[in-house]
Amino acid sequence: MTTDQTRPATDPHRLRAPDPPQTPHSVLNIVIPVYNEEASLARAVTTTRSFLDNGFPFSTTITIVDNASTDGTWQVAGALAESLPSVRAVHLDQKGRGLALATAWSAADAQVLAYMDVDLSTDLRALAPLVAPLVSGHSDLAIGTRLSRTSRVKRGVKREFISRSYNLLLHGTLGVRFSDAQCGFKAISAQAARALLPYVHDSQWFFDTELLVIAEKAGLRIHEVPVDWVDDPDSRVDIPATVRQDLGGIVRLGSELVRGRIPLETIRRTVRPGDPRAPAPTDASAPETQSGSLLRQLVRFGLIGVASTALYTVLLLMLQTMMSAQAANLLALLLSTIVNTQANRRLTFGVRSRAGTLRHQGQGLLVFALCWLLTSVALSLTQGFSPLVQIVAATVANLVATLLKFLLFRRWVFRPHPADSTSAANSNDRSSHPTIISGGDK
């Protein structure tokens, strides 16, 4: 039962890895980051402590991290640390969930490090399945997922849409396979944390995503556990600001990966020195970027285009209730373009390997910029008309851009590229693909 006054490092964006523990005080350390949670903190910690003390199979410590709260949160946290067994409290003078987790994990002396949200949205019965694969050494990270078919989730349409759109964006831009980046229910082995944290730069909400992406790209094992989850109506997350930060984080992280600034192979060897490399992509030969006849490509491109246009229209209808017509148009086009590029890459132009994925998405986004320009002009010309007229005009403009998109895809984006051929041919020796173990049907 201790309380700590901890200040962040001089540069909070360079997050420090935990020091190697001597003798672990407990098997599991659960971090609960809080900001102005005076009213709900006591219930969350006492409920969690009671759950852990009644049959949980591993020894545990709870660490409350107060993120520069301006109410009485720190006083409540200190009182809880004094009155409850194996509860610690840490105060930071600077906000940031990523900073809170990195600080607490750096000071923890447990074998497994975890975190959960103070609102207890996730059913605690998922905690043992989350931690067990890390204790056994089978996996390196574990995440709760709200997007499995066996998960039971209660939340509004808006949050459901934002969550699925964000994960779709990650899959399309960074080529990851884990299903739910931002569920507030995760765990990591101390060994993996020591290897990964020096390369995680975000100190805010993108921390989770950056940690997971680097881990997957390095070939570490990520275990997924379907969870029962109930939305907290009093959530303090600033959605617009978080979206802007996440988009910036995706661009930055993608750039670092493309330029080879993160030593993925070193991370893999540090965490899993005895593991063989993950299997290479099914098709490790040069991509067949012009597979099949022109007619077959046109048919597949057309079918994908119809599906993408339908997706775009549905997204636009939903987003127009949340933001301006231009902003809704931009986001709907961005999401549908990422899906469209990935589908055409694989199904229309026969690119099977992962080589060149980020470059193709970048080129696809340039094509997207043209589509956005066309639809923006259509919206401008119909300004003052009903939303239905605007949607029809934007949809027609999107269809007009489809033919030009096909020509650009065929003649520019998915033309054979020497780098693709070289990267794919060397994938057996150089690539590190993750092993993802799902706790249920995906």
Image (cartoon, grey):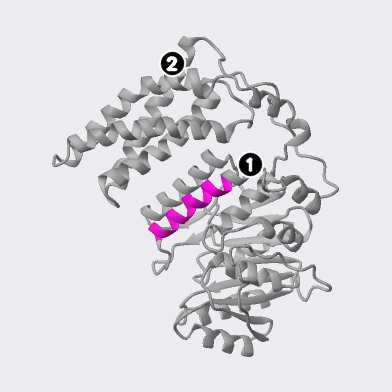
Return the x and y of residue 161 as percentages of the image width and height: 40, 49
Residue 240 located left or right of residue 385:
right
Q: Which residue is mark 1?
A: 259
Vertical arrangement, residue 411 with respect to residue 6, above or below: above
Considering the image in quadrants, where does the C terminus appear? Answer: top right
> Which quadrant holds residue 194?
bottom right
Residue 442 seen from this side: no
Q: Is residue 75 left or right of residue 28?
A: left
Q: Are marks 2 and 1 in contact (CB under 8 Å)?
A: no
Q: Amino acid at mark 1?
A: Arg
- Magenta span: helix, strand or loop, mainly? helix
Query: Disc 2 vs disc 1: which is toward the camera?
Result: 1
Q: CA distance from mark 2 to mark 1?
A: 36 Å
In the depicted structure, whether residue 409 falls above or below residue 55: above
- Which quadrant is the N terminus positioned in? bottom right
Residue 127 sits inside the magenta stretch: no
Task: Say which quarter of the image contains residue 11.
Answer: bottom right
Residue 288's place in the image compared with 206, above or below, is above
Q: Residue lying farthest right?
A: 274
Name the residue beneath numbered marker 2. 299
Task: Give the SS element for disc 2.
Answer: helix
Front-most of residues 272 and 122: 272
Q: Residue at x 61, y 18 (%)?
A: 288
116 with respect to 421 (left or right): left
- Indicate yes or no whether the magenta region holds residue 252: yes
Q: Is residue 331 visible?
A: yes
**Foreground of the two, 86 or 102:** 102
Q: Secondary structure at mark 1?
A: loop
Instruction: Give the residues drawn in magenta, as a range.
Output: 239-254
